Image: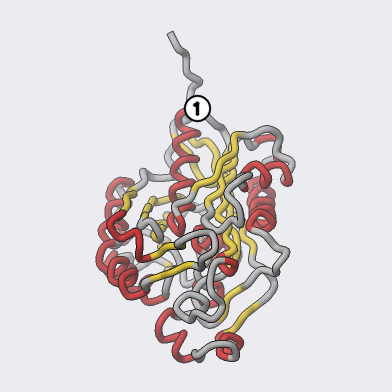
Amino acid sequence: MISSPPGSPGARVLAFGGYQPSRVVTNDDLAKTMDTNDEWIRSRVGIASRRIAEADESPVDMAVHAGGKALAASGLAAADIDLVIVATCSMETAIPNAAGRVAHRLGIQAPGAYDVNAACAGFCYALSAASDAIRAGSARHVLVVGTEKMSQWVDPGDRSTAVIFADGAGAAVVGPSETPGIGPVAWGSAGDKADVISVADRRSHLFQEGQAVFRWATTSLHPVARAACERAGVDPASLAAFVPHQANLRIVEAIARRLGADGAVIARDIVDAGNTSAASIPLALSRMIERGEVRSGGLALLLGFGAGLTYAGQVIELP
């Protein structure tokens, strides 16, 4: 008979951490190099500025910064982490993975380490995997990181992408709990629409059919948000925060209206952070916590969605 290690009744996020590159690029800066202006960008996507990494700053570098902050805030030592999951879709190369290098640079010795590519939904996928691993007994403490250098995959002269995508990282430390602190995931995909966000080959830039993505996001995702609440047994009206992927301010606000979370603080990190893909949800949450916009113990709905097309959401208890 095969024995199995005992798991934990539940899992919860112990801490968040975020990192943004120092270089700020405003809409006026972009207007100097392409046919656009501040009013055009703000009216269509809601972005005022974004952070862009330097040429020698990699997704791994940013992940180390964010992961180190989350680890410090959790009160745990590197030796306590036995699994590292990195969500990213913007690595320069596929091999080696980011997770093993992030773990090594943070002094985490010989953890399980793997990357997840579910694009902008990646952090929610990775968070669900971390929760499942803890409850199954496969891990006790997990570092989950979303990190992206989207600027290296967009054509700097293409206003349909260059004005939107940006760089950064966000991280969470997940640990065991006697009661559930991470709700069941509601996830899925729409592979028939995979070509609306794509990179053709290793020599190509990111392509996005913006109007198709907008229509899909504003019509298909509020039921996913509601399903995540239902699976967690949570009334949307009781949410303290709603933190969707920061794709477009109009999308964020449209989903929030249809969800009915009238008392929740809505993450609008995209205004000065841009779309950081898998990093956007943990980065937004870490900044909301730093600014005191959300309270410890409150419930937050996370909703990731993007290329694939993939989507995932879950309710968490805030650390």
Provide residue 186's location: percent of width, then percent of height: 33, 48
Residue marked by disc 1: 137
Q: Is residue 155 above or below residue 74?
A: below
Q: How many marks?
A: 1
Query: Where does residue 136 sit, x and y in percent of width and height?
Result: 45, 29
Residue 243 visible here: no
The residue sitting at 37% across, 74% down in the picture is 210
Colouring of the image: secondary structure
Return the x and y of residue 260 as percentages of the image width and height.
28, 66
Q: In this rendered view, identify the residue nearer to me: 106 or 267.
A: 106
| x and y, in percent, of residue 5 in the image | 50, 20
Question: Looking at this view, is 92 or 147 the one in front?
Answer: 92
Q: Categorize mark 1 by other alpha carbons within 10 Å: few (<14), some (14-19), many (20+).
A: some
* Image quarter of residue 266: bottom left
Q: Residue at x 54, y 81 (%)?
A: 157
Q: Residue at x 39, y 45 (%)?
A: 183
**Which residue is painted at 59% across and 55% down in the image?**
91
Q: Which residue occupies the extreme top position in the image? A: 1
Left or right position of 113 against 108: left
- When asked about the image quadrant of residue 82, the answer is top right
User: Is residue 39 visible to us here?
Assistant: yes
Using the image as rendered, state which of residue 287 and residue 37 is in the foreground. 37
Name the image quarter holding the N terminus. top left
Report the amino acid beneath label 1.
Answer: Gly
Q: Secondary structure at mark 1?
A: loop
